[in-house]
Structure formats: C-alpha cells, structure tokens
C-alpha cells in the first residue's frame, strides 16, 4: 500500500515537502458535538474533524501585521538553527544525511524553511510531513517509509512551538518504542523547554500559529479512524479547498526564504543549553496546575497555553475563557479579536499565565 500511495505536497512546491498522509473523505462534525464526544470519551478527536473556520478580513489583516513584524526574526532563527545543525553534523552528533520530519500541521512551514536553508548551504536534506496524534503516537507506517530510505541517525522532528508538552511527550514515547533513542525536536518557540533545539524560549506570536490550513499547504489536521485508515495506511487528511482563495502557504515561506539569504552572513548558530529546560518545564506545569485548580479542571487537555496554542484552540474547539498577560500586547491582537467576535470571556492575569502570554481554557461538556 505504502509504495503505491498517492502522495502530495499540498500547495507547496514538490521540492519543499512530501506529506506522508492518505487523502480521505469524512463528513464534518459540528464543533459542539465534537467537543461532547471528545470529553465524554465516546470518540477520540482524531476520528472526527469539523469544517475549518474561514478567517474574516480583519483577522487576515492582523495576520499580515504579525507576519511583517516577525518575518525577519523567523529568517534569523531558521538560519541560526541550520548553522547549529551543521555544527552538530561536523561534531558527529548528527548523521550527515538530514531528514526533517515536520509534525503535521504546525511544523510544516518551518520544516519547509529549514529544508530550504540546509539545502542552500550544502546539506543532504529531505523533508516529509508526518502525523502525530495525542494518545495514538507517531504514524509508524510513515516512519517505516522514511527509515527504509534515509539514515535514522539524521532524523529531526520539526514543530512550530511547544505548549504544555503533550505532543513532545507523545513523540518521545513513540520514538523510543520505534527507534530505541530519544527524538531530536526542533521548534521556533520553546517556552516550556521540551525541544532539543529552538529559536528561543519565548512565547511570541509565530505568524503561522494564528492560521490553519491556509498556511499549511491546504491540508487538514491528521485523521485516524478505523473506518478510513487500514493498518497499512498512513494517517489521513482532507484537502481544505474552501480556503484556497486565501492560501498563503507558499507566499509565506518564499518571503522568509528570501530574507534568509540576506541574514546568512550575519547570523550565528543558535545553541540552547540544557540547563534551563528543567526550570522551563517546572514553570509550565506550575502555571497549568494553577489554572486547573482555579477552574476545577481534572483533564489538563482542556488547558491550552501559549499564544499559538491558545489561538488555535479558539478556532477549532469550544473555548470557555481566555487568560492573557496584557490587554495592550500587540502580539495578542488576533486572539483578542477572536474573543471579542466570539464573545469569549477574557481575563488579564500575568500571575496565572506565567511563562506564557495567553492560555485558553476549553469548555467542559457534559
């Protein structure tokens, strides 16, 4: 099945990424119903998908403002991470054949950028988009496909940011079972200290974090339903064609790639020491447990910390409340706009948000 699968690059250039995903057809589940099924345990979130919300014109303007503020920073961090990878290759810490496995979807734009930068500076690099699902793990069929073609010691997983560490822990468990080693995780923003390599440990507005399919190649989040996915299949996805007229996937990476060329000479390698990671993780969980205690939350999956995670939770889930560090924070404009248009309660609380600038609490459904 795998060798005969019809694989796609979405709306990216075919040289940028190959998604190891199976296209499926599935009826959308209304958000309220999906939330009820998830929280009652009647269905796993990966078995359903809702139609992705279309951002309004003002929201797209807020994205463009965030992009213009952040594109140079992203370029510098991509260049710095690429140089750090090359240093580790030179030291023998990584195989010279690098394979980037971007976690669908949030990691994909940055996997594309890192792949382009590594290729431009002479590294043997391939890039795949692979699925990982909370409670289900990595797509092992995808990883078998990759490791039959590429050296396992050069595999780096790519994501956009870290939140409370659920996906990072899922990746660690899955990769330990598959490969017997700890995974290498590369992200732009690692405020919670779960990544091997990161652009920074700051919770900042990564522009792609406030959009969905229309900045990720017009693919949906991954789907894993036994009615659609056979044991030998890749995890599934659906094309998000109703957002095709506002797709910015390729324009976003093209703009930043051009900036990487100008930043290449002045940027050094980004080296993150391990000493601060433990403290970052402790700060994260202290913050999450504070929110849980205040709201009598017994399922921490209802708490979504970090600007990007908090924003996407409002777009895809049924939010109860949003905590922000400051009402005047320019990076929170899109999040505040969603709260105002969706009548989601906002509370300013620097104490509760801790290392994050925003946290969304998902509504409990009986």
Image (tube, rainbow, N blue to C red):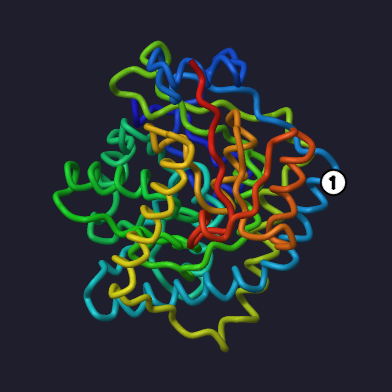
User: Percent from the top left, x then y, of residue 241?
Assistant: 69, 29
**Mark 1 nearby-residue class (10 Å; few <14, some 14–19, many ≥20):** few
Quarter of the rendering occupied by the N terminus: top left
User: Percent from the top left, x then y, of residue 238?
Assistant: 56, 26
The one nearer the camera, 146 or 280, is 280
In the image, what residue occupies the spot 44% across and 54% down? 162
Q: Is residue 33 left or right of residue 215?
A: left
Q: Which residue is mark 1?
A: 58
Relative to 11, residue 224 above or below: above
In the image, what residue occupies the spot 53% across and 84% down? 267
Residue 70 sits in which quadrant? bottom right
The one nearer the camera, 28 or 251, is 28
Camera sees residue 243: yes
In the image, what residue occupies the spot 26% across and 68% down? 94
In the image, what residue occupies the spot 17% across and 42% down? 177
Q: Secondary structure at mark 1?
A: helix
Camera sees residue 127: no
The residue positioned farthest toward the left in the image shown:
180
User: Percent from the top left, x then y, of residue 243?
Assistant: 73, 34
Relative to 9, residue 114 above or below: below
User: Percent from the top left, x then y, of residue 92?
Assistant: 22, 75
The one nearer the camera, 50 or 317, is 317
The residue positioned farthest toward the bottom in the image shown:
266
């Amino acid at each position: 099945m795998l060798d005969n699968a019809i694989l796609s690059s979405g709306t990216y250039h075919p040289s940028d990424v190959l998604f190891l995903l199976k296209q499926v057809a599935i009826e959308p589940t209304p958000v309220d119903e999906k939330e009820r099924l998830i929280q009652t345990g009647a269905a796993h979130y990966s078995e359903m998908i809702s139609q992705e919300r279309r951002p309004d014109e003002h929201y797209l303007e807020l994205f463009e403002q965030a992009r213009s503020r952040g594109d140079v920073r992203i370029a510098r961090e991509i260049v710095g991470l690429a140089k750090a990878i090359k240093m580790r290759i030179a030291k023998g810490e990584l195989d010279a054949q690098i394979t980037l496995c971007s976690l669908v979807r949030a990691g994909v734009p940055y996997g594309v950028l890192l792949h382009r930068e590594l290729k431009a500076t002479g590294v043997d690099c391939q890039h795949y988009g692979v699925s990982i699902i909370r409670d289900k793990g990595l797509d092992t069929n995808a990883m078998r496909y990759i490791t039959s073609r590429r050296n396992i010691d050069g595999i780096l997983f790519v994501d956009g940011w870290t939140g409370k560490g659920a996906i990072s822990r899922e990746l660690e468990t899955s990769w330990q079972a598959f490969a017997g080693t700890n995974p290498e995780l590369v992200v732009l923003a690692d405020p919670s200290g779960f990544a091997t390599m990161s652009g920074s440990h700051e919770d900042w507005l990564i522009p792609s974090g406030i959009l969905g399919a229309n900045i990720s190649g017009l693919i949906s989040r991954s789907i894993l339903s036994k009615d659609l996915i056979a044991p030998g299949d890749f995890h599934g996805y659906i094309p998000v064609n109703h957002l095709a007229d506002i797709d910015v996937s390729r324009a976003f990476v093209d703009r930043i790639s051009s900036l990487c060329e100008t930043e290449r000479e002045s940027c050094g390698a980004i080296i993150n020491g391990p000493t601060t990671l433990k403290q970052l993780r402790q700060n994260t969980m202290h913050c999450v447990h504070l929110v849980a205690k205040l709201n009598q939350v017994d399922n921490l999956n209802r708490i979504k910390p970090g600007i990007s995670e908090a924003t996407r939770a409002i777009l895809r889930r049924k939010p109860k409340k949003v905590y922000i560090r400051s009402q005047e924070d320019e990076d929170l404009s899109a999040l505040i706009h969603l709260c105002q248009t969706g009548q989601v309660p906002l509370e300013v609380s620097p104490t509760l948000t801790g290392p994050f600038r925003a946290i969304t609490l998902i509504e409990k459904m009986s």
